[in-house]
Image (tube, rainbow, N blue to C red):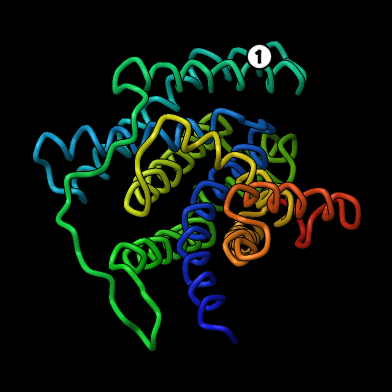
Amino acid sequence: MDTQIIQLIVNGIAVGSIIALGSVGLTLTYGILRLSNFAHGDFLTLGAYLTLFANTLGINIWLSMVLATVGTVLAMLLSEKLLWSKMRSIRANSTTLIIISIGLALFLRNGVILIWGGKNQNYDLPIAPALDILGLKVTQNQILVLALAVVVILALHYLLQNTKIGKAMRAVADDLDLAKVSGIDVDRVVLWTWVIAGTLTSLGGSMYGLLTAVRPNMGWFLILPLFASVILGGIGNPYGAIAAAFIIGIVQEASTPWLGSQYKQGIALFIMIVVLLIRPKGLFKGTM
């Protein structure tokens, strides 16, 4: 296989790690809350900018990521309190929820521009040379991003499979009414859903900032690959979303020699359309 293609696949794995974290949060909010949240990408951007803010104050990058996660989770919980809980109480339809989420996305993006400006910015980190591994150029940040993504995904797996809240989340995703009858505290499940989604999304944004410049529209450009991963992996299935994210990340990067980098987003759209035509429920079974 050509070295250039292998190099692009390595880059795609790193990008896929970011998409995986963001798409898991997105698929959880849909699977449990039945919410197609178009503001999800902008919460990812918020996580990156909060990391940037803490880092420029002289705080260690890893602690900055933790602080950014707390801030992003609080922002998501605030949106739940002010918007989504009220919409569920009046049984708002999916169209209304989508319109509100788009409005929330615009609010977050313009808020970021108001506070931090519209120019590209970078974390205050020392420049580390790329590693030469079998002729491939792999940056230390790419390795860190993949390693952190693997750790987070394993932690998520443990939470969903081995904890009471994880089992409750799976029950609510499978059948909300049956979960209520069974005595599951749905409000607690909703709270934990936002906490997990906010944590994964913020970490995804922080890690994306390690690979590229932090900019106000970074999350908006990721929203299409995020939704494509959710659909390809089976809506509501976090494991399917993770697998699909790596597929999309690799295919996007590997396509650049033929299509150019400006059409990478189109690949995600093309994959999403093909899957919807052939397997409307995705490659994997939906829900957890």
Left or right: 183 as drawn, with respect to 22: right
* Placement of 251 over or under 103, stated as above or below: below
Q: What residue type is labelled 1?
A: Ser
Element marked by disc 1: helix
Q: In which quarter of the image is the C terminus?
A: bottom right
Q: Nearer the viewer, residue 243 or 122?
A: 122
The residue sitting at 66% across, 38% down in the picture is 30
To which quarter of the image does residue 113 belong? top left
Q: Where is residue 24 in the image (x, y as percent from the top left)?
A: 56, 50
View extreme (right): residue: 278
* Placement of 73 over or under 92, stated as above or below: below
Q: Position of residue 283 (x, y in %)?
A: 78, 62
* Dot 1 crowding, Cα within 10 Å, few <14, some 14–19, many 20+: few
Left or right: 93 as drawn, with respect to 245: right
Q: Find disc 1 in the rendering and name its residue.
A: 89
Q: Where is residue 249 in the image (x, y as percent from the top left)?
A: 58, 60
To which quarter of the image does residue 75 belong? top left
The residue sitting at 38% across, 88% down in the picture is 134
Left or right: 55 as drawn, with respect to 1: left
Q: Nearer the viewer, residue 91 or 283?
A: 283
View extreme (left): residue: 58
Q: In which quarter of the image is the N terminus?
A: bottom right
The residue sitting at 43% across, 25% down in the picture is 77
